[in-house]
Image: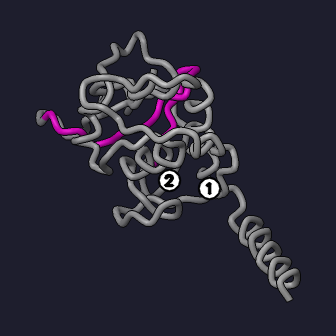
Amino acid sequence: MKKRWASIVLTGMVAVSAFAGTVSTASTASAASISVTAQKGSAVNIANEQKVINNIIQTGKNLIGQARYNHTYNAPYTMDCSGFTYYIFKKNGIDLKTRDDDKQVSYGKYVPKSQIKPGDLIFYNANKPSKDVTHVGVYIGDGKVLHMANSTSNVTISKLSGSWHTANYLTARRVIE
């Protein structure tokens, strides 16, 4: 009976995994070995920085075509832009502490736009003249940003040099180094 039950559970896990499709984030296996909290004003120094950053980016890419933009946080299925960054970092052992982009901008250290690198958070303000943060994404290299854009595009990759990104760029923060 125990063997049969174990077989049913394992079969169910495989079925759930297959059903989840690319929502599965198997590349985040290293998250179990990392559990750090983002710091205000400084980056978190971790030994396997590049692997974690690559996993964060891959976790986000796996949500393309799967997750939907919504202000109700039900990750990995629905979330807004700051919920997206919170989720993909948290899934990989980095706790951003908040799903509020106005608060996420205080974590990590300032990075000039000319020095951004993959894994840096990119913040925008599309509500000028206020200085509020209205959007956040993750720089993935090659001049591109991975973000939960809106209810039409959902999770997407955009060019940092695109007109909207250029006009609304506010700052960048490095959470991991």
Residue 141 in the magenta stretch? The answer is yes
Gap in angstroms between the C-alphas marked 1 and 2: 8 Å
Residue corresponding to mark 2: 154
Give the residue at x 32% y 51%.
99
Give residue 124's quadrant in the image.
top left
Marks 1 & 2, CB-CB < 8 Å contact = yes
Identify the residue under disc 1.
65
How far from the left and from the top, in percent, is residue 110? 29, 19
Which element type, helix, strand or loop, lies under badge 2? loop
Whichever of callouts 1 and 2 sits on the residue coming sooner in the sequence is: 1
Q: Residue furthest front?
A: 2
Residue lying furthest top in this view?
114
- Residue 82 included in the magenta stretch of the image: no
101 versus 75 height, above or below: above
Image quadrant containing the C terminus:
top left
**Can I make out residue 163 in this image?**
no
**Identity of the amino acid at label 2?**
Asn
- Is residue 78 shown to the viewer in this render? yes
**Relative image position of residue 159 (x, y in whole percent):** 51, 28
Residues drawn in magenta = 131-148
Q: Looking at the picture, does residue 1 appear above or below residue 61?
A: below
Q: Choose between 42 and 33: the one closer to the eye.
A: 33
Other-residue count near label 1 (Cα within 10 Å), few / some / many at <14 / 14–19 / ≥20: few
Magenta span: predominant SS is strand
Foreground: 48 or 152?
48
Assess disc 2: are there few (<14), some (14-19) or many (≥20) residues with their C-alpha within 10 Å of its C-alpha.
Answer: many
